[in-house]
Amino acid sequence: MLNGPRTGHTAFIDAGGLDECFPTVRGTPDHGGLWNQPWDGPTDAPWITDTWPTSLELNVYGPSDGTAIGAVLVDCPTVSVEDRGAVLTLQLSCPGQPVSTALWRNQAGFPIGAPYRSLGVEPMLGRVVDLAEAGPGDAAVVPASGELTWRLTVSARPV
């Protein structure tokens, strides 16, 4: 992991992970203090509020079409992904805190100039991806003890 800006580094691998998103997915700093990639994406991307199932067709990971779409499934602690005869289920538990799931489907639409393909299913503490957008009860709060405990259960089974 690089510490600081990636100036002079051209290789990029999106290894992803829950740890990169503390305390937020988006905002300042982008992907929390542990994420080392500067944000250079469009700042005027539309924000759409929709119900699930959504009209954004996030249920299909198809061919490269130049799109990149993200969504937050608010108050959704459990999500399953089905592929090639198997189901992977992720369940996040953090009593007394809001939990949701972020989805990211990149079909060669991001980043501009060097697009790649990726699919992210990211259990998250909170209901928003940017603390600046959080309303009452939207963000996880570390109690006075200084510790916040959560459990991520990952299971797989054949279909």
Image: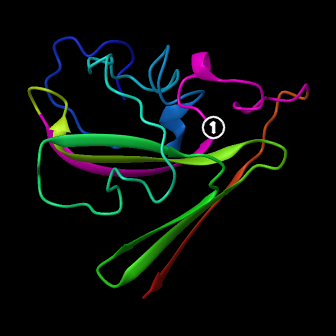
Q: Is residue 68 above or below residue 123?
A: above
Residue at x 53% of width, y 38% of height = 19
Q: Nearer the viewer, residue 118 or 42?
A: 42
Residue at x 87% of width, y 29% of height = 143
Q: Where are the magenta residues, as a range?
A: 115-144
Q: Is residue 36 above or below residue 55?
A: above
Give the x, y percent position of residue 141. Answer: 78, 29
The residue type indicated by label 1 comes to: Arg
Q: Nearer the viewer, residue 38 or 74?
A: 74
Image quarter in which the C terminus is found: bottom left
Query: Which residue carries the number 1 mark?
Result: 127
Neighbor class of circle 1 (other Cα within 10 Å; few <14, some 14-19, many 20+) is: many
Left or right: 57 with respect to 25?
left
Residue at x 31% of width, y 42% of height = 69
Left or right: 156 with respect to 114?
right
Give the x, y percent position of residue 70. Answer: 38, 41
Which of the 4 quarters of the picture holds residue 152?
bottom right
Q: Is residue 11 above or below residue 125?
A: above
